[in-house]
């Protein structure tokens, strides 16, 4: 089993000049020999164990919600929303928002509502396109790391600094309500929740085969596409919350067009043009498949024809070796030359042929 994805060291990842240097020298961290071997091995492993197959009959959409220890959650009866990762770091300029007073960082509120917005987006896409779209919702859920973070001493200190409280009953109730909302939503065609190894592979399969991916995270989707994508012929469109430096350049080399995620309304405005592009690609692929099927049929027919001619040729060679064929050939020749004593010559020729045939 393989447990690593080869990515560029973080100390280099934020150095655009380094990226430009390797771009100009036609080299890449993501296309070296190790990555190539790793990609082949892991795809072989997944295909053998999970028998992953692409859905070619639908426009596949992945909605990825980052939760875990980065969740935006309702913390208390005072209606404080807290960004778990930012709050624990003491980044209070954009780590909380209050629903009652509308104070705090609006970005935290937008992230808090993103799951509801994903549901609305999925519903609208099915209203517009029906079964032509297949929508997969992916989230790691609220992991142990989340509870570990909010129950840590550091988190408690940051709460005291801002005179805020954390009611674990309200937090748990919020988490249960959110989870039930995801599971019981019929706008999603497939729901993947968790962070086990099997779930991780299933997640990878959905992302690699998606035509459109929208993520509330920055690096998770990027690293999967760069570390795992093998089918460069599959064009993909990705919306990420933010991009690592030169990330769009690297993704473009893997046939992925990336945009900064702003809101679902702007994506809905572009879905018609996105579908036009993919319908064209789909039609071209179908046309190519039909042409390929015709070519294969023609090749099969030609092979059969060649085989048939070959059999006839071999049979003709055998026929020419027969005594009757040789005698018949000489008799025809004698008949044409009867006035020159052809029949007399034929008698002696026939005796000779018969003798030769006996000694074979």
Image (cartoon, rainbow, N blue to C red):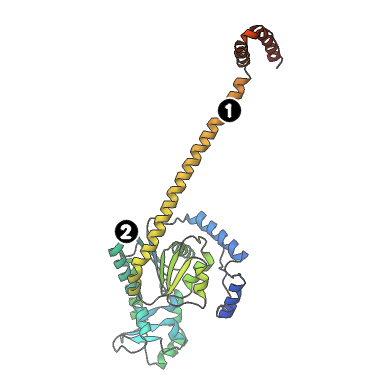
The residue depicted at 58 percent of the width and 27 percent of the height is 313
The answer to whether 232 appears left or right of 21 in the picture is: left
* Residue 150 against residue 200 in the figure, above or below: below
Mark 1: few/some/many CA within 10 Å (<14, 14-19, 20+): few
Q: Residue furthest right?
A: 359
Q: Mark on residue 131?
A: 2
Q: Quadrant of the N terminus?
A: bottom right
Q: Give the SS element for disc 2.
A: helix
Of labels 1 and 2, earlier in sequence is 2
Q: Are marks 1 and 2 in contact (CB under 8 Å)?
A: no
Which dot, 1 or 2, sits closer to the camera?
Answer: 1
What residue would you read off at disc 1? 313
Question: Residue 30: horizontal and vertical position, in percent?
Answer: 57, 68
**Camera-nearest residue between 332 and 299:** 332
The residue depicted at 35 percent of the width and 82 percent of the height is 109
**Camera-nearest residue between 341 and 175:** 341
Question: Residue 222: horizontal and vertical position, in percent?
Answer: 49, 71
* Residue 67 seen in this snapshot: no
Question: Residue 61: horizontal and vertical position, in percent?
Answer: 38, 65
Q: Give the SS element for disc 1.
A: helix
Res 118 quadrant in image? bottom left
Q: Mark on residue 6?
A: none
**Camera-nearest residue between 267 and 176:** 267
* Residue 34 against residue 84 in the figure, above or below: above
The answer to whether 229 appears left or right of 96 in the picture is: right
**Camera-nearest residue between 166 and 87:** 87
Q: Quadrant of the C terminus?
A: top right
């Amino acid at each position: 089993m393989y447990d690593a994805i080869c990515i560029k060291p973080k100390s280099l990842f934020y150095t655009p000049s380094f990226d430009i240097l390797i771009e100009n020298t036609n080299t890449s961290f993501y296309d070296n020999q190790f990555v190539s071997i790793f990609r082949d091995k892991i795809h072989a492993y997944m295909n053998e164990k999970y028998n992953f197959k692409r859905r070619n009959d639908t426009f596949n959409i992945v909605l990825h919600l980052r939760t875990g220890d980065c969740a935006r959650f309702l913390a208390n009866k005072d209606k404080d929303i807290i960004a778990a990762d930012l709050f624990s770091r003491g980044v209070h300029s954009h780590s909380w928002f209050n629903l009652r007073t509308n104070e705090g960082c609006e970005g935290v509120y937008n992230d808090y509502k993103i799951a509801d917005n994903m549901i609305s987006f999925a519903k609208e896409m099915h209203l517009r396109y029906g079964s032509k779209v297949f929508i997969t919702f992916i989230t790691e859920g609220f992991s142990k790391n989340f509870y570990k973070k909010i129950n840590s001493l550091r988190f408690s200190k940051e709460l005291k600094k801002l005179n805020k409280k954390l009611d674990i009953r309200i937090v748990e109730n919020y988490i249960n309500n959110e989870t039930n909302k995801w599971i019981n939503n019929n706008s999603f065609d497939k729901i993947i929740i968790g962070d086990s190894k099997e779930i991780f592979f299933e997640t990878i399969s959905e992302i690699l085969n998606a035509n459109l991916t929208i993520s509330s995270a920055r690096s998770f989707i990027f690293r999967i596409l760069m570390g795992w994508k093998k089918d460069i012929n599959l064009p993909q469109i990705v919306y990420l919350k933010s991009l690592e430096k030169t990330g769009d350049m690297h993704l473009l080399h893997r046939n992925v067009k990336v945009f900064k995620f702003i809101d679902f309304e702007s994506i809905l405005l572009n879905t018609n043009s996105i579908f036009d592009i993919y319908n064209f690609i789909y039609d071209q692929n179908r046309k190519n498949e039909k042409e390929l099927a015709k070519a294969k049929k023609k090749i099969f027919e030609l092979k059969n024809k060649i085989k048939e001619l070959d059999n006839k040729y071999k049979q003709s060679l055998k026929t020419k070796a027969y005594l009757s064929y040789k005698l018949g050939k000489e008799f025809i020749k004698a008949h044409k030359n009867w006035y020159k004593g052809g029949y007399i010559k034929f008698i002696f020729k026939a005796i000779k042929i018969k003798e030769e045939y006996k000694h074979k």
